[in-house]
Image (tube, grey):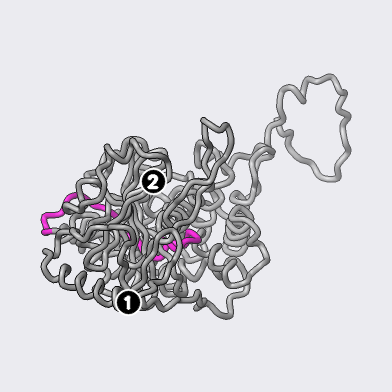
Amino acid sequence: MITFYQEAIVKTSSPFLFSCLITSLQGLHRQLKRKNLQVGKKKNPLLFALNIVHSHHQMKVKNVKNSLEYFKLFFHNDLIKHIIKQTNLYALQKNKPLMATEDEIYVILGAMLLSGYVKLPKKRLYFCKDNDVPTILQDSIRCNRFELILQHVHLNDNSELNETDRLYKLRPVLESLGETFQKHYGMDEHYSVDESMIPYYGKHYAKQFIRGKPIRFGFKNWAMCASTGYMLAFSLYTGKSSEKKDFGVGGDVVLNLITLSKLPPNSGIKLFFDNYFTSLSLMRHLKELGYYATGTLRANRTENCPVKDVKQFKKEARGHYDYRVADDVFVCRWNDNNVVTVATNFENLAITSATRWSNEEKAKVQVPQPSLISNYNKYMGGVDKCDQAVANLRTRMRIKKWWWPIFAYLLDVSVVNAWLLARKNGCTRDTESLFVFRRFIARSLLSTHGTPPHQGRKPAKPLSTMRYDGKEHWLVPINTERRCAN
């Protein structure tokens, strides 16, 4: 059904005129080239029909009792056993038999999670005997054993190195987490695609520099997240590829993430992405595949669309908008603090209002805003939510391996996903905040899988300010003979 909109939905009073208008516009469409949006707007835009099947979020997780079990949905026994095997193999290749166990690997993960909210500058300080340092890690593993395992931790066999795979050292973990991320999550209606940065300051060919970002140096990760911040699919950028891009680098990233996420077509799924990814050809292709999409559009990618020029738009009042429609693609340009252009393959033109501050009236005023822009602002922030959650409790423990920051990042994302999964599934215990959830997992891993050292430890040396404070510390009689602490 074709409808007309102009700030509100109106009905035509003449069926004959309505029929003639449709016939003439259909003939005009056949004469136009596919890459030219030449259908002009007079008073009312002609918009395409929609057949959207709304999806609902359905959880796939059952019989999970606590927060630790949600975490182990992603770092499951098979993945842990693989890490143990490769770690012991790498140590054996170095002629240093390690014999790491499953409990010790879980303790390493618990220590990494602990470092996200107990921040110390060096790893050895977690084993310090001073009373201002938590002892939970000291009571779980010896310091020398802990450092020895970290020195040899490995994720893939070096003897079978595939030089064409730039992420070979991480490949088993990438595949395992990519599968479990989409396996245990139901289907949402709105997803966003954006880039995420993993901090890294060493030397590596895949390291990127992006000016103006909170994390300027590091590895770039393409991510698809639900509007809640749950990361459904990801793809690490490993440098420029020689393969031909049909829809540009950004367009192929979107298509690749759709493939990795295994989102079903023609199910009402809506994708949102920024102007790095958006092109009109990508919008048409996604429509053909059965996916709805909305994205901001760069001025040089409008393909000769006769929408009003940006320079003219800047002279208009705030809230002014212009639009064009063709080939099931709708392009709208709107003037706010700056001029923004948005393209969509499914939304109609409905005018809402946005609250803005007026310097002339010295008060907040209502400004006309097309609904596709308000929806874009509402659902585009999924990747940013995930990044914010990871940044608040980022793993601080570091070792001298280039792939370690990526592994630590994926561990942090797994905790965020497990937390969102638990909340969506109705789990209320230890899920009121990400900090409480992460702390519960860290304490559970260290206390459940840790083994207290058998040998006695030397007591901490008292501070000199306490020894010579003149408080007259009296001798206390004891039954057994011991050495003085000093």
Figure quadrant of residue 166: bottom left
Q: Which residues are magenta?
A: 225-244
Residue 297 visible somewhere in the drawing: yes
Give the residue number, with chain letter if any, for mark 1. 265
Tell me if residue 464 is in the magenta stretch.
Answer: no
- In percent of the image, x 58 and y 80: which residue is there? 63
Identify the main secondary structure in magenta: loop
Give the CA separation, mark 1 to mark 2.
35 Å
Give the residue number, with chain letter if any, for mark 2. 320
Residue 116: percent from left, percent from top: 53, 47
- In percent of the image, x 61 and y 64: which residue is there? 448
The reply, left or right, for residue 109 in relation to residue 15 is: right
The reply, left or right, for residue 213 in relation to residue 131 is: left
Figure quadrant of residue 461: top right
Q: Quadrant of the N terminus?
A: bottom left
Query: Is 369 rendered above or below residue 17?
Result: above
Q: In this rendered view, identify the residue nearer to me: 202 or 48.
A: 48
Query: Mark 1 or mark 2, which is nearer to you?
Result: 2
- In percent of the image, x 31 and y 39: which residue is there? 210
SS assignment at label 1: loop
> In the rendered structure, which disc, 1 or 2, sits on the residue that comes first in sequence?
1
Question: What is the three-letter code of the residue carrying label 1?
Answer: Pro
